[in-house]
Amino acid sequence: MDLAFTAEERAFQEDVRSFIRDNLPDDIRHKVETGKTVEKDDYVRWQRILNGRGWLVPNWPTEYGGPGWTAAQKYIFATELGASPSPRLIPFGTSMVGPVIYTFGNAEQKAHYLPRILSSEDWWCQGYSEPGAGSDLASLKTRAVRDGDHYVVNGSKTWTTLAQYADMMFCLVRTDSEVKPQQGISFILIDMNSPGIDVRPIVTIDGGREINTVFLDDVRVPAENLIGEEGKGWTYAKFLLGHERMNIAGVPTSKRKIADIKDIARAEADGAGGALMDDMTFRRKLAETEIKLQALEYAELRMLAAESAGKAPGAEASLLKIRGTEVQQAITELTMEAVGYYANPYVAESFQAGWNEDPIGPAYAGPAAPVYFNWRKSSIYGGSNEIQRNIIAKMVLGL
Amino acid sequence: MDFNFTSEQQLLQESVERFIQDEYDFDTRRKLAGSDDGFSRDNWAKFAELGWLGVSFSEDDGGFGGGPVDTMIVMEAFGKGLVTEPYLPTVVLAGGLVSRHGSDAQKADIIPRIVEGELMMAFAFAEPHGRFNLADLHTTATADGGGYVISGHKAVVYGAACAGKIIVSARTGGDVRDSDGVSLFIVDGDADGLSRRDYRTVDGLRASEVTLDNVRVGADAVLGPVGGALPLIEEAIDYGTVAVCAEAVGAMKVLHDATHEYLKTRQQFGQPIGKFQVLQHRMVDMFINYEEAKSMALMATLRVDDEPAVRAQAVSAAKVQIGKSGRFVGQESVQLHGGMGMTDELNVGSYFKRLTMIEVLFGNTDYHLNKYAAA
Amino acid sequence: MDLTFTEDEQAFRETVRRFLADELPQDLARKTEGGWHLEKEDVARWNRILHAKGWSAPAWPEEYGGTGWSPVQRYIFNEECADAWAPILSPFGLSMVGPVIYTFGSDEQKAKYLPPILSGETFWCQGYSEPGSGSDLASLKTRAVRDGGDYVVNGHKIWTTQAHWADMMFCLVRTDTEGKPQQGISFLLIDMTSPGIQVKPIITIDGSHSVNEVFFDDVRVPVENLIGQEGMGWTYAKFLLGHERTLIAGVSVSKKRIAQLKRIAGAERQNGASLLEDTSFRNRVAEAEISLQALEMTSLRSLASENAGKGPGPESSILKIRGSELQQTISGLLVEAVGYYAGPYELERFEDGWNEEPIGPDYAQGSMAMHLYGRASTIYGGSNEIQRNVIAKMILGL
């Protein structure tokens, strides 16, 4: 047993670190550091920089453009990326539909879509949840009816993150309503420019506009856009959920944010002549969160070791999702607590890049409350934490 | 021991609750929060007409002679409607200070105008670097001629934009954080040298950064004893805290009921999600938290007129409970509503945000826990 | 609205306080304070003293020997008893089977059983749980078959507190296996000296003997020992569970324990200061104290509603859950407060006549015993999970 990285791994780590330092554009870094809204162009620019180095899709097989890294290298890369003030990588193409396409797609689909994901030419979104099908995803109702060499799709999808930017959607649709719910679902790729698609924003409680409802009204989708077989969509979707566990817990980013809280707590007064960082009660809570994060990190490392030893990861990933989101939420709470009364002023324009006025209160206070409210989503999305616990109960504990 | 309302109090409760139900639905509130003032002056006139603005002031001063229980009744109902009108700053904070400690002239000038709905007020007690310490004041008031010259920066002053008068805490002596040397001044909202930066708050209200640059006031602007006003401020903040505890109970009730209803109606896996035991127990814990919060808000209301040490302990205990319960109920309401709980369209988020900010207001849970434990 | 007690109530408090000062034996108070398990004779002695004053069953109707006190007076009495470290009387007769007998029993049963319950002459135990029937109590299997003037009882009860002290057991038995499980249950009074009864101790994690298994092998119980009607036992059992809810929270005792906790934490040293000056520890004590206040206010709201004749409101349903959680929080803090000396554990200390010097401070071992045995409080009397089910169903309609 050894917790240390090898010399090669350390060299690799240095490589990644310096690449990010030298290549992350200053304007993007600034936006991330100050909590400003990251625009589509920012995401795309950063993804293209990574792709230029061949590092956009660490988990893809080399034949499709992956770098062929070991599990440890992938971990190091994810850690360094998460620890840096870089925009998150939009997962829909690179981590979600990409692996589905190279695993279950045909040669034409691979040749067409994979390069466009790598080059960020296509922005993807995920058409899963529906107004009536949330945790009970298999009850989805969006219908795709075969008409000649097309499917005609009708229905609505919701909670569709960044659909407003998307060129393509991978979508679960019902092609058969006679069989068991799971068996009548197919996985199709829909061009978001097709006639009959209407994307409407959902404003979230923090004032954000990242998610949408997508209405599909007689949308014609070429039959060649079906992935794999008709009726096998549930299988592909499950494959996708089990994929890309790496970094699901968000440990590196949480570490960076804990360091940010410490900076804030050193700058904030405790009302007794010292800094908030001197306040035992606050420090204790911060320490508890940090320790929880450490436990999470070591849980992740243990799974990494198991994976390196060739053991297929199981439902333990649900543990990473539950604890990871709990820690993220605790961090946003602590940040909001740290800024005191200045959590309250809300200047919507201040999150835009061009806003030049002086902040109200310290600059770090502005995003504190909206970020706290926004992160309440994390225990809901991607399979709510209740569903994750159900999965552990069933798959791990056999209850 | 008696937990019954008087018949007057019952009437008051019925009338405020009816107003909230009939005239303050969520869409109305949303429109008001987005309007220029952030509230409705017509509503304010109606509050005056119905007597709500005078409910807590003594009859001698032109009020209706009620007490903390009456304020609790109003604030709890306002919490259910997330009322944006500046009742807390005008009536509870500033009005309360004037009625308890104002000179006869100040009371005669101010209280009847509050009661009639002609004067709104604010209380500027916080400063950018003081966190929750009420004595941590950099704002100074220097005696000059017969009056004072005040300079400083007051932070996150609720209701300042519409306030005809703002009560400002400032140092006339002592060092930052000394108990002695703190004074209160009633300053005109349009006084020379006073400037405001107004903004919206995350919970849908309005507040301002208030800067005083050599603002001159007369000796008659002093409220309470010169240099000895800290106990008055603490008392005012305790009354304010009790009021927001009641408001929080009203807000929690709405979240509790909305979530309860959602569990009964939202169908997944072929049944209402309220049939799942995991979610039932979560709902029960929301229920327990709500009942505990209600008990403690009541306790603090019935203790706030006691001597300062008893009052302060009761208020801190209540604020800790409300802070914890409010956070729990707010977070769980969002979680149990799933994605819907995250949407701005549903009312849940707005109540959650107000509860979150009530936890910060007048000192957060940690602050009050420390204060309670250290006493 | 106000929180003050009337002059009459304050005078009543004074009377109770004086009585306790004069009559409560100090050795019993010390044992209670120290967290010791009491002997049967300790409990019986205190019961006799209270009975002599007419105060052993304050909640009973006056005609059966109750005090005729208002709910507020009962609350005050309870507070004062806790404050004086009076022992808790055995609840099985006074709080449980007594009310069932005077509500559903025949005149003969009332005349026979109630007086010796009041005086503490007979000890009762509760025959509810079985090895296969815990939270799912209605699935119980102990059979009572009618045979002439007797029932013949066969089966097995478990977690029977004080069965080794008991003269009598009130017992849920199955008299009918047809129909819904709840409908075949009857409520029987069983003489513990009957042939065929075997009581086997269960030693709990604190090393003490409070609970037992009770085996029934062809035990003959006279038919006149049936309470009410055959098959109605479930109804009587539910009545009993709903009884005396406002006192279930144990607020007064918990208050006393927090005061004790503060005393102990004030005596423990760390880094040259008392543990009570440690912000983290101090704040956790404060949190417990605030939760206790919330519980107390909730009890009082419920009490006021009862006083006004309205019956307890929905808020009373939270009392068992929060009350037991809080007892555990407090005993956990007590154990933390004593540090390393939570470890030494000599059972002989709890026996009368033990005279050696304690290892570490004398409050240490009782804290651990209380902490260990106290884990039962969220399990017994309907586990807190079952309590939450009950609230979800009965109050929230889920």
Image (cartoon, helix red, strand yellow):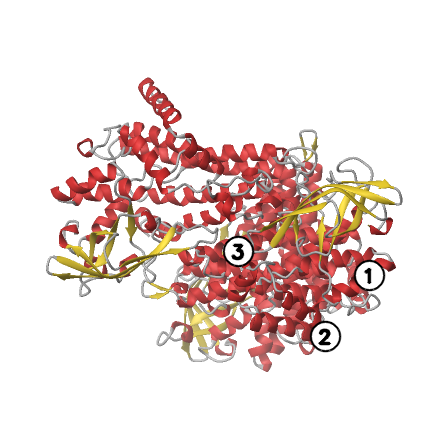
Q: Residue B73: x and y, percent?
A: 67, 67
Q: Secondary structure at mark 2?
A: helix
Quadrant in which residue C295 is drawn: bottom right
Query: Which residue in the protein does label 1 denote?
Result: B109
Q: Residues within 10 Å of mark 1 (few under 14, many from 20)?
A: some
Tell me: B55 left or right of A125.
right
Give the Cα distance between marks 3 and 1.
38 Å
- The quadrant in which residue C356 appears is top right
- Between the C-alphas of marks 2 and 3, the distance is 32 Å
- x and y, in percent, of residue A91 in the image: 31, 42
Mark 1 falls on what kind of element? helix
Where is residue C359 drawn, in percent x and y? 64, 35
- Residue B352's disc number: 3
Chain of the residue displaying label 2: B
Residue C45 in view = no
Do labels 3 and 1 touch, CB within 8 Å? no
Residue where numbered disc 2 is placed: B8
The Cα–Cα distance between marks 1 and 2, rounded to whole angstroms, is 27 Å
Q: Tell me the quadrant of the picture where the N terminus of chain A can be found.
A: top left
Residue found at the very far top of the displayed protein: A7
Q: Specify the farthest residue to the left.
A: A148
Q: Earlier in the sequence, mark 3 or mark 1?
A: 1
Task: Name the residue: 43% across, 80% down.
Answer: C148
Crowding around mark 2 (Cα neighbors within 10 Å: few <14, some 14 to 19, many 20+) is: few
Q: Amino acid at mark 3?
A: Phe
Q: In this rendering, do the residues under marks 3 and 1 share a single chain?
A: yes
Label pair 2/3, CB-CB below 8 angstroms: no
Q: What is the secondary structure assignment of the residue under circle 3? A: helix
